[in-house]
Image: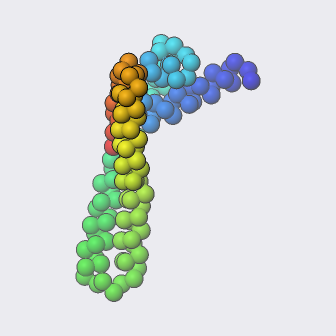
C-alpha cells in the first residue's frame, strides 16, 4: 500500500472517530499513528469542528422530532384505539427509539465486567494498572456519553 493511500485512510478513519465523539487530538494521534499536530491540521483544514457540531445538532433534532411524532401518534391512537395503522405507527416509532438506545443488558454487563476487573486487579496487587484502567474507563464513559447523547 502506498504511503499516500495509507495516509488518506488514516485521515478518513480519524475523521470518523472524531465525528463519533473522540475529539482529543493527542489521543487521535496515538490511535492513528500520527502526531497531534497533524490531527489538529486535519481538524482545521477539514472543518471537522463544524461538522461535529452539525451532527450533534441533527441528532438532537431527530430525537425531538421522534418524540413529537410518538406523542402525536399516541394522541391519535387514544382517540381511535381500533385503528391498526396507528397501532403499527406507535409500535414502529417505539421500536426505532428503542433500537437507538444502548441496551440495558449491555450496560449491566459492562458494569459487572468493570467491577470484576477492578476486584481482580486489587486482589493481584496491580495498583498502577488499576489506576490506568480507571482513567481509561472514565475516558471511555465520557466518550460514550458524548457519542450517545
Side (left or right) of 11 relative to 1: left
The answer to whether residue 72 is above or below residue 100 is below
Q: Residue at x 39, y 54 (%)?
A: 105
Query: Farthest residue in the bottom direction?
Result: 82
Of residues 115 and 84, the one nearer the viewer is 115
The answer to whether residue 90 is above or below residue 118 is below
Q: Residue at x 42, y 30 (%)?
A: 22
One can see residue 83 in this view:
yes
Of residues 146 and 70, the one nearer the viewer is 146
Query: Farthest residue in the front direction?
Result: 123
Colour scheme in the image? rainbow
Q: Residue at x 68, y 20 (%)?
A: 4
Q: How many marks?
A: 0
* Image spot of residue 81 (x, y percent): 30, 83
Residue 72, quarter of picture: bottom left
Of residues 33 and 59, the one nearer the viewer is 33
One can see residue 57 in this view:
no
Quarter of the image with the N terminus is: top right
Quarter of the image with the C terminus is: top left
Of residues 28 and 133, the one nearer the viewer is 133
Side (left or right) of 73 relative to 17: left
The answer to whether residue 100 is above or below residue 140 is below
Amino acid at each position: 500500500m502506498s504511503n499516500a493511500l495509507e495516509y488518506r485512510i488514516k485521515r478518513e478513519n480519524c475523521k470518523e472517530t472524531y465525528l463519533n465523539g473522540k475529539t482529543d487530538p493527542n489521543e487521535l494521534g496515538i490511535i492513528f499513528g500520527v502526531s497531534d499536530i497533524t490531527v489538529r491540521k486535519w481538524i482545521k483544514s477539514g472543518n471537522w469542528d463544524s461538522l461535529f457540531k452539525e451532527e450533534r445538532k441533527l441528532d438532537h433534532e431527530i430525537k425531538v422530532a421522534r418524540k413529537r411524532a410518538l406523542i402525536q401518534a399516541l394522541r391519535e391512537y387514544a382517540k381511535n384505539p381500533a385503528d391498526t395503522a396507528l397501532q403499527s405507527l406507535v409500535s414502529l416509532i417505539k421500536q426505532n427509539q428503542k433500537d437507538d438506545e444502548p441496551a440495558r443488558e449491555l450496560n449491566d454487563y459492562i458494569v459487572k465486567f468493570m467491577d470484576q476487573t477492578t476486584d481482580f486487579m486489587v486482589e493481584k496487587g496491580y495498583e498502577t494498572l488499576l489506576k490506568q484502567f480507571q482513567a481509561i474507563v472514565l475516558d471511555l464513559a465520557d466518550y460514550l456519553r458524548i457519542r450517545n447523547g
